[in-house]
Amino acid sequence: MRFGRIAAFLAVSLAVAGSAPASAHPSPAPDDGSLRAAARGSGVHIGTAVDMAALDADAAYKAAVAREFDTVTPENVMKWEVVEPQPGVYDWTAADRLVDFARRNGQLVRGHTLVWHSQNPAWLTEDAYTPAQLRALLKKHIFDEVGHFKGRIWAWDVANEIFNDDGTPRDTIWSRALGPDYVADVFRWAHQADPKALLFLNDYNNEGVNAKSDAYYALTKRLRAAGVPVQGYGMQGHLGVQYGFPGDVVENVRRFDKLGVKTAFTEIDVRMILPPDAAKVQAQAEGFGLLLRACLLAKNCVSYTVWGFTDKYSWVPGFFDGEGSATPLDENLQPKPAYDTLRETFLLVRR
């Protein structure tokens, strides 16, 4: 029971998180030294996004995915542009390989993502289809994809990044063509396609209490009151040491607890302006630790997923000029202080 340990965990973790060396808190039981072993029994799954090209070509990367994590999320291979590159022509090859890999290694799969304004196939445009046709295509996509993986996906990011940072609805192909009710529809369709999968909203810059998370809170409350099967709230956790970290993450996660939904940190990385130095590296460790502590201190937080675990394959340098070093392991798959912080925080809960 997580709450049987929570008072001691809180008292100690606030004092040591982000600053204690890995040797300060020895493991309560022998294990293989992995994050996966450390998280066992904590009530929180530890996961990573997976680069399928790396999984196929890099044996060390593949071994680390299997060893360190008990859930996996596809970085790209379940997105619409990949699975349906031409209308009605599906390609599940890469996604199926990941699901099969996870099954062989005793891992759960988080599906990502069903409805998004980005990475849609080139053929899917408002010029080519009427609103009624777009609605039919969206419904078919959800039934086809969720149905293909039925019983093999633990949780889905159903609606991704639907609000702006100021809490207003994002202007997308779906909001323009279908209006705001499309969010309720896609959750109902996904639930019909696989009633056992957990269904999540998911976004970035929503980890603390702010205009965007307020919008998600109001939406979740409203949809659940209407019987819409919104079962989870995902906070991506793309942080940067140069911006500081939100101070009210626990408060935010706990208010979603009270709505009766699961919560998860779904895409965590903590980037910095290059080159790294000791201060940035320690700040990064605190960023990773902050989100993990919030998850462990919440009743219904079920998973903590890093968006890639090694700088060798990180997306960050390609999107943020002059920034990087955003993951818990370096380019040679050697652990940074962030890795030690994650492992020791999990072990602290088990003491």
Image (cartoon, rainbow, N blue to C red):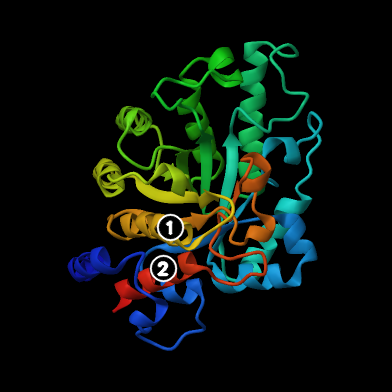
Instruction: Describe residue 328's horizontal placement relative to residue 21 as left or right.
Output: right
| Camera-nearest residue between 181 and 50 | 50
Which residue is at 68% across, 56% downward?
313
Which residue is at 31% across, 28% downward?
218
Instruction: Describe residue 320's horizontal placement relative to residue 267 as left or right.
Output: right
Which residue is at 69% across, 63% downward?
100
Tell me if residue 238 can be seen. no
At which x and y percent is residue 136? 64, 22
CA–CA distance between discs 1 and 2?
Answer: 8 Å
At which x and y percent is residue 264? 42, 50
Q: Are marks 1 and 2 in contact (CB under 8 Å)?
A: yes
Q: Residue furthest bottom?
A: 30
Q: What's the residue type where badge 2 is placed?
A: Thr
Which residue lies under the disc numbered 2?
A: 341
Characterize the local packing of mark 2: few (<14), some (14-19) or many (20 or more) Cα atoms within 10 angstroms: many
Q: Is residue 53 above or below residue 131?
A: below
The local secondary structure at tag 2 comes to: helix
The local secondary structure at tag 1 comes to: helix
User: Which of pointers 1 and 2 lies earlier in the amino acid sequence?
Assistant: 1
At which x and y percent is residue 285? 43, 61
| Camera-nearest residue between 113 and 287 | 287
For the N terminus, give its image quadrant: bottom left
For the C terminus, give its image quadrant: bottom left
Quadrant position of residue 11: bottom left
Quadrant position of residue 184: top left
Which residue lies under the disc numbered 1?
A: 288
